C-alpha cells in the first residue's frame, strides 16, 4: 500500500518537495494543499513593484503541473492538524470543509505576514507598500508609478525602503527594491528629485540577516558592509540603521535606533517588509489536546531538530541548526522553508534607545527553501521505506547563491552576485570567519543582471516541470 504524503503549502519548499516526490509515485500518494492555485517566483516581484515586469510573468497555475505529474492538489487552507488521527482539516476555496488523512506530513506553509505587528504597517492599512505577494507587488508598482508622475511634473518626493518591524527578515529583497527604484529613476532622469532612504533593522549595511558577507580576492578580504555601504554612498541613499519601526501613519512613520529616541520620519512613498510569523494552525494530540506549544515556538513556526536553548551571540554554535527538519514531538511531521523555527538569529541583536530588541532575522527563502524542501522529501521517502532519515542539510553546511538585482536592464542594469559557504557561520569548522571564504563570492556588475534574468527563466521552466527540469539544481 502506498504511503500518503500531505504537503501544506506550495511555495519554494513545498513545491520543490512535491516535484522531488513525484519521481516516486509508485511508492507514494502525494497531495498538495495550497490556498491559491498558483506558484509565485518571488525573487522577481521586486521588478513588478517598480513596474518593469508584468505580474503574470512571475507565476503559473499549480493544478496544471500537478495533474501532469500525477500529484493530487487541493485548493484550500489547512486549519487543524490532528496528530493522533493523522488527519488535516481544510477549508476549501469553495468555503466548504474537508478532511484529509496522511502517513507523513510536510508543513511548508510559508510565512504569515505580520503587518499588524507594527501598527499601521502594510497595504491593508493603506500607509505603506509591500512586495511579499503578487497582489502587493502589483499595488506597489502602481503606487510607485504615481510617484514617478509627480516627479515628472517637477515635484520632489521622499522614498523610504527597508523593514517595517525590528525582527523582520528578507532585507535582501528590500535592498533589491531600493536599488531598482534608484536605477529606474536614473533611467528617467528623475533621480535628483527624489530622496531615497534605507531604513533597516540590520546592524550594518549588507547584513541581510546572515551576519554579513565576506569573500577572499587574492590576499584581500572583501566585506559586504564596505561594498554595500559604498553603493549607498555612491548612489546618495541615506541610511538609518539599525532601526525599529514602531508605528506607520499616512505619510510618516515612527522609528528608533540604539542612539535615537522615537523619531517621526515623513515620506511620500514607503515599501517596508513586515515580520514573518508562522501560519496559524491548530495542533491536536490525543483526545483533542491542544499541543501547539509542543509543536511550535512562540512565533508560531514549527519546532524541529534544533537546539532552542536561549544563548547569547557569542555562544551560538553551528550544531544548533536543524539537519533533517523533523518534529521531535511527532516523527511523521516535517517542516520546510520558512515554516521551521530557527534556533536563533544569525546576526547580532541590539537594543533600541527604549530597550526593545532589534534583530535582522535569518532568511530561509529562495535557494535555501528549495534545498530544504528537497531534503525533507528525501527523508520522508526514507521513512516511507521503513528506514531512518538519512539526508542532512543544516544551514551550517548549505551553500547559498543570491543575485541581488540593482536594475533589470540587460544593458544598463547591474546586480550584486553573492555566494556564501555556508549560510550560517560555523566557527568550529572555519575558526577565522565561520565560512569558507575561498568558496564565497561577492561581486557587482552587469553580469549579475544577466544571471538574475537567466535564473528567472530557468527556474520558471524547472518549477513547471518542463522537459529536463530535473537537471536544474535547487
Image (cartoon, rainbow, N blue to C red):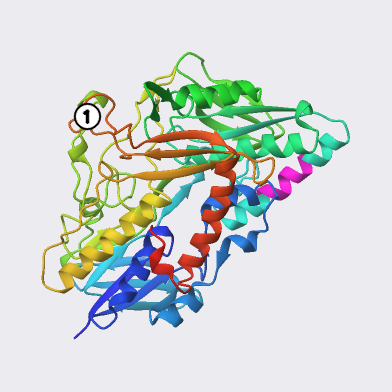
Of residues 13 and 272, the one nearer the viewer is: 13
Of residues 438 and 462, the one nearer the viewer is: 438
**Any magenta on residue 255?**
no
Of residues 347 and 87, the one nearer the viewer is: 347
- Residue carrying label 1: 427
User: Measured along the vertical axis of the image, is residue 340 above or below residue 228?
Assistant: below
Horizontally, residue 114 falls left or right of residue 434, namely: right
Q: Give the image quarter of residue 110.
A: bottom left
Element on which disc 1 rests: loop
Query: Given the current orientation, which residue lies at the most extreme right position?
Result: 153
Name the residue: 58% across, 48% down.
450
* Quadrant of the rendering where the N terminus is positioned: bottom left
Horizontally, residue 81 falls left or right of residue 463, namely: left
Residue 214 in view of the camera: yes
Mark 1 packing: few (<14 Cα in 10 Å), some, or many (20+)? Answer: some
Horizontally, residue 189 falls left or right of residue 320, namely: right
Residue 313 placement (x, y as % from top left): 26, 26
Query: Given the current orientation, which residue lies at the most extreme bottom position?
Result: 1
Residue 163 placement (x, y as % from top left): 52, 35
Q: Give the image quarter of residue 178.
A: top right
- Segment colored magenta: 140-147
User: Measured along the vertical axis of the image, is residue 328 above or below residue 433?
Assistant: below
Horizontally, residue 428 falls left or right of residue 473, namely: left
Q: Main secondary structure of the magenta part?
A: helix
Amino acid at each position: 500500500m502506498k504511503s500518503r504524503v500531505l504537503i501544506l503549502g506550495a511555495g519554494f519548499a513545498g513545491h520543490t518537495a512535491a516535484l522531488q516526490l513525484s519521481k516516486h509515485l509508485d511508492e507514494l500518494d502525494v497531495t498538495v494543499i495550497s490556498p491559491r492555485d498558483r506558484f509565485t517566483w518571488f525573487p522577481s516581484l521586486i521588478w513588478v513593484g517598480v513596474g518593469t515586469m508584468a505580474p503574470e510573468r512571475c507565476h503559473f497555475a499549480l493544478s496544471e503541473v500537478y495533474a501532469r505529474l500525477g500529484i493530487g492538489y487541493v485548493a484550500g487552507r489547512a486549519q487543524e492538524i490532528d496528530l493522533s488521527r493523522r488527519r488535516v482539516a481544510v477549508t476549501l476555496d469553495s468555503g466548504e470543509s474537508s478532511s484529509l488523512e496522511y502517513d507523513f506530513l510536510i508543513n511548508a506553509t510559508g510565512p504569515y505576514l505580520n503587518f499588524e505587528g507594527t501598527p499601521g504597517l502594510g497595504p491593508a492599512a493603506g500607509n505603506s507598500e509591500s512586495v511579499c505577494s503578487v497582489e502587493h507587488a502589483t499595488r506597489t508598482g502602481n503606487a510607485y508609478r504615481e510617484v514617478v508622475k509627480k516627479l515628472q511634473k517637477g515635484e520632489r518626493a521622499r522614498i523610504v525602503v527597508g523593514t517595517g518591524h525590528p525582527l523582520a527578515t528578507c532585507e535582501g529583497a528590500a535592498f533589491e527594491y531600493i536599488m531598482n527604484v534608484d536605477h529606474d529613476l536614473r533611467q528617467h532622469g528623475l533621480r535628483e528629485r527624489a530622496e531615497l532612504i534605507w531604513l533597516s533593522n540590520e546592524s550594518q549595511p549588507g547584513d541581510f540577516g546572515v551576519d554579513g558577507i565576506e569573500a577572499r580576492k587574492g590576499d584581500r578580504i572583501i566585506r559586504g558592509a564596505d561594498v554595500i555601504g559604498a553603493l549607498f554612498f555612491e548612489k546618495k541613499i541615506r541610511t538609518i540603521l539599525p532601526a525599529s519601526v514602531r508605528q506607520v501613519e499616512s505619510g510618516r512613520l515612527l522609528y528608533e535606533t540604539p542612539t535615537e529616541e522615537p523619531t517621526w520620519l515623513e515620506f511620500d512613498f514607503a515599501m517596508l517588509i513586515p515580520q514573518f510569523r508562522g501560519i496559524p494552525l491548530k495542533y491536536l494530540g490525543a483526545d483533542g489536546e491542544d499541543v501547539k506549544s509542543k509543536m511550535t515556538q512562540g512565533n508560531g513556526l514549527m519546532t524541529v531538530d534544533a537546539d532552542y536553548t536561549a544563548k547569547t551571540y557569542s555562544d551560538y554554535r553551528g550544531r544548533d541548526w536543524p539537519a533533517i527538519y523533523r518534529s521531535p514531538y511527532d516523527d511523521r511531521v516535517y517542516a520546510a522553508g520558512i515554516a521551521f523555527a530557527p534556533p536563533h538569529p544569525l546576526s547580532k541583536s541590539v537594543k533600541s534607545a527604549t530597550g526593545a530588541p532589534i534583530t535582522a532575522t535569518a532568511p530561509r527563502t529562495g535557494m535555501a527553501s528549495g534545498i530544504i524542501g528537497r531534503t525533507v522529501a528525501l527523508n520522508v521517502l526514507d521513512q516511507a521505506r521503513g528506514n531512518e532519515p538519512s539526508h542532512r542539510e543544516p544551514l551550517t553546511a548549505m551553500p547559498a547563491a543570491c543575485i541581488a538585482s540593482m536594475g533589470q536592464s540587460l544593458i544598463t542594469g547591474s546586480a550584486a552576485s553573492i555566494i556564501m559557504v555556508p549560510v550560517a557561520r560555523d566557527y568550529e569548522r572555519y575558526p577565522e570567519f565561520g565560512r569558507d571564504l575561498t568558496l564565497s563570492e561577492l561581486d557587482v556588475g552587469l553580469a549579475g543582471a544577466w544571471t538574475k534574468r537567466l535564473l528567472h527563466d530557468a527556474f520558471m521552466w524547472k518549477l513547471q516541470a518542463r522537459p529536463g527540469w530535473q537537471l536544474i539544481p535547487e
